[in-house]
Each structure stands twice: as structure tokens, then as C-alpha cells.
Amino acid sequence: MALQETVDQVVTGLGYELVDIERTGGGLLRVTIDWPWEGSERFINAEDCERVTRQLQFVLEVEGVDYARLEVSSPGIDRPLRGLRDFERFAGQLIDLTLKAPIGAAAGLGVAANRKKFRGQLERTESGWQILWSDTPEPKPGQKVSRKKAPVPLMALGFVLEDIAQARLAPVVDFKGRKSKVAPTQQELESRGKAGV
């Protein structure tokens, strides 16, 4: 049985979802797990990782899989987006997107033709997906923004999943102890642009 299939069976059998498997040259076998999405967010904790680690150690020994060290972890705040289910789950979130081929010129005026990396809000469209972004930097914390300032121009880039080399959730960290911010919706982005905020 292939390693991917074996690990996937163990992880899903315990009620988790396999996000990624990585093998390194030093013998490290890294397995990333998450809870299956059921409309609400649940987070992987140390007990979940320990539970999967124990079961995997047993199964991998029985299967005769050669590895030096096993590491089971959560996807973290920069979770990779692998397939359609992940894109549907995280629609509306801020993501980092790397395309296979540069199509920056197709995104609109002012975008370098060789650009492949974008950070913006993921949205579903009738023909696939799009990312909405602005290259205008966010104001620094505590910085006052003039109401007379011109609206922030938003750009959109449409793509299909086959165009993607890599996609991840963009890490959004709030060190003040509040809930992490959710990426603004299209309406919020548009109203922010109209208000000049």
C-alpha cells in the first residue's frame, strides 16, 4: 500500500482530514492534519496530534515504512489550500496565491506582466475564482487617514484551480488578544474605497 493511502486511511479513520504529507532527505516524515470542515471552525490541539502520532507509529511499523522521525502537526495560520473543498471552505478569506505562469498583465493596468504572486480576498465567480486586492499599503497602526484621500483602487484577477502553483491562507495575526480579523467582504472593501478609509 502506498504511503499516502496508508496515512490517509489512518488519519480519516480517526476522524481527521489529511492536509499534507512531506518527506525530507533526513528521514523526517511530516504529516499535517485538520478537522473536516462542517460549517464551523475547530482547531487541532496537541492531544489530536499525539493521538494521530501514536496510531501512525503503530501502522507505519506494521507496514514497514522507513522513516527516522515522525512529526504530526496542524496546518497553522498559513494553511495550504489544496483543492476545491479548501477553496470553498475559505472563500472570503485573505490568501496568498502563486500562479504557475505570470499573468499579471491580464489583471489590469499597473500590474507587472511577469507577476505571479498576489495577496487578496478569495471569491467564487460564475466561471471559477477570483482574488481581489489592492497594492496600496495598509495604514500603520495608529496612523490617521485623511477622509479626503482618494479611494483605494481594487483589482480583480480571475483564475481556475489549474492555474495555481501554490495557495495558502495569508497569516493574519492580532497581538492585542482579540479574535483574528476575517478578511473584509467585497461590500466592505467597496465601502472602504468610497469612504476613503
Image (cartoon, rainbow, N blue to C red):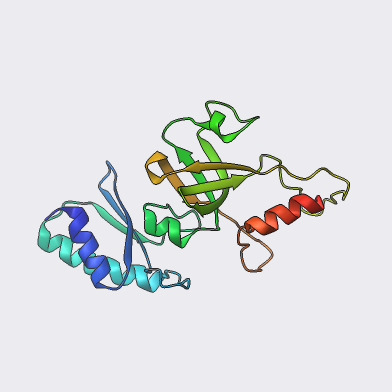
Q: Position of residue 42 (x, y in %)?
A: 45, 72
> Exactly how many numbered labels are in the figure?
0
- Most distant residue in the front direction: 126
Asked whether the viewer can see residue 54, the reply is no
Tell me: 90 left or right of 178.
left
Where's the N terminus, which quadrant? bottom left
* Vertical comparison of 86 with 150: above or below: below
At 47% from the left and 39% from the top, the residue drawn is 98
At 45% from the left and 55% from the top, the residue drawn is 79
At 54% from the left and 32% from the top, the residue drawn is 106
Choose top left, top right, bottom left or bottom right for residue 4: bottom left
* Vertical comparison of 113 with 179: above or below: above
Q: Position of residue 184 (x, y in %)?
A: 64, 58
Q: Position of residue 190 (x, y in %)?
A: 70, 53
Asked whether the viewer can see residue 80, the reply is yes
* Vertical comparison of 122 with 106: above or below: below
At 29% from the left and 68% from the top, the residue drawn is 52
Tell me: 115 left or right of 9.
right
Q: Nearer the viewer, residue 173 or 163?
A: 163
- Most distant residue in the top direction: 113
Tell me: 10 left or right of 176.
left
Q: Nearer the viewer, residue 78 or 60?
A: 78
Q: Position of residue 70 (x, y in %)?
A: 28, 57
